[in-house]
Amino acid sequence: MVAEEIHLNPFLIENGIECLESDLGEFIVQLDHDEPSHIVRPIIHKNRREIANTFLREKIAPDYNDDPETITRRARVHLREKYFLAQAGITGANFVSAESGRLVLVTNEGNARFGMAPVPLHIAVVGIEKIVPRDRDLALLLNLLGRSATGQQLTVYTQFINGPRSESQPSGPEHMHVVFLDNGRTDVLASNCSEILRCIRCSACQNVCPVYRQASGHAYRSPYGGPVGAVLSPILFGQRFPELADLPKASSLCGACQEVCPVDIPIPDLLLRLRDKGKKEKAPSRGAPPMAPFATLGSSPLFWRTAMTMSKAMNHLPIHVAPVAPLRNWLDQRTLPEWRGGNFRKWLRNRNSNSAT
Ligand code: SF4
């Protein structure tokens, strides 16, 4: 996630360094010049047919085969070759213990471990919020992460890295560098939303969020989607991308995110604080128009009745040849459902008169 955040891969490629994602999902994202849409499942927006086509196009597979096991095996053969040629392995870290300096990395594919074994250099890029005080905190946090991210008691591979390889070790990097990344995190710490730094990136809040589940991660225009992204992105990247200030509005405030969050981050409260801040700073708004016209419509019975009657006419209007370009573009991709509203009052009147007789 941190590499996505600082656009590390495009920077390295621009500078003539071949760089390859080793996580299967991230690898597919890279092949498609796409972006991840979920913290733990980066290609949740793709299906196996799309992936099989990508492999065929990129000549990773000799023929089209959309069997998930075959896709995985083919990716493994391709990546395995690259591991042995690599000059450096770049990882993040899920946690770093301040007590021992241990770096903790969890994966379900073993890619971090495999990627580090043959390379002479290991570089870890780690957000400063990943530092935990003591080794013994790791037991709890690793358990919380596995359970909340994928329902596992523990992820399949959990690596504790103490430094470059020792003389007694047969393989591993000879050199290791750890880069601690701030990138706005101290601003978050100083803000009234500092609780979000407790996030362990388990994605549980994304999985339950009704907005994320409809909109998908790309709608959040940041590596961090869903409820955590709606809080984190405007604070981390708001200076450069002020339009992200509209993300806290993308929530029904149902509270499901806080309920599942293993570290009990009060996400709905944080979203309200950010909305308040955006209002005070008159942050730019994107997307849906303000609710004021709807409030006027909804609070006047006369306006409401007129609008309901007129809305029936929509079924007969040639909307698909709408002269307004944004509406036409929108309708090119969607079928407007037939208007069936406006009958409630009639139904209630009939019901009342029937029950009276
Ligand atoms: S905010 Fe909580 S639930 Fe969401 S990713 Fe972070 S730790 Fe997980």
Image: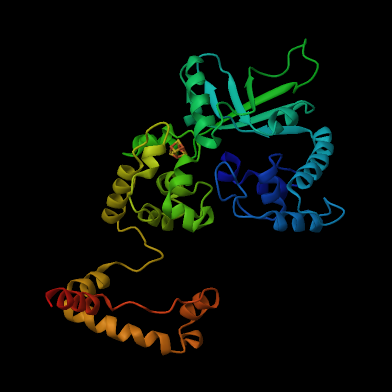
Image check: 126 left or right of 47? left
Q: In which quarter of the image is residue 80?
A: top right
Q: In this view, does 330 lie above or below 249?
A: below
Q: Describe the colour scheme in one phrase.
A: rainbow
**Is 229 or 188 nearer to us in this picture?**
229
Residue plotted at (55% across, 44% down) = 5
Image check: 107 left or right of 70? left
Q: Residue 189 location in percent, x, y?
A: 38, 34
Q: Residue 304 location in percent, x, y?
A: 23, 78
Q: Residue 291 location in percent, x, y?
A: 28, 67
Q: In this view, does 192 lie above or below 221?
A: above
Residue plotted at (18% across, 71% down) = 299
**Is 56 or 19 nearer to us in this picture?**
56
Q: Can see residue 18?
A: no
Q: Residue 335 location in percent, x, y?
A: 50, 76
Residue plotted at (24% across, 77% down) = 347
Q: Which quadrant is the C terminus positioned in?
A: bottom left
**Is 179 or 83 nearer to us in this picture?**
83
Q: Which quadrant is the N terminus positioned in?
A: top right
Q: Quadrant of residue 185?
A: top left
Image check: 344 left or right of 144? left
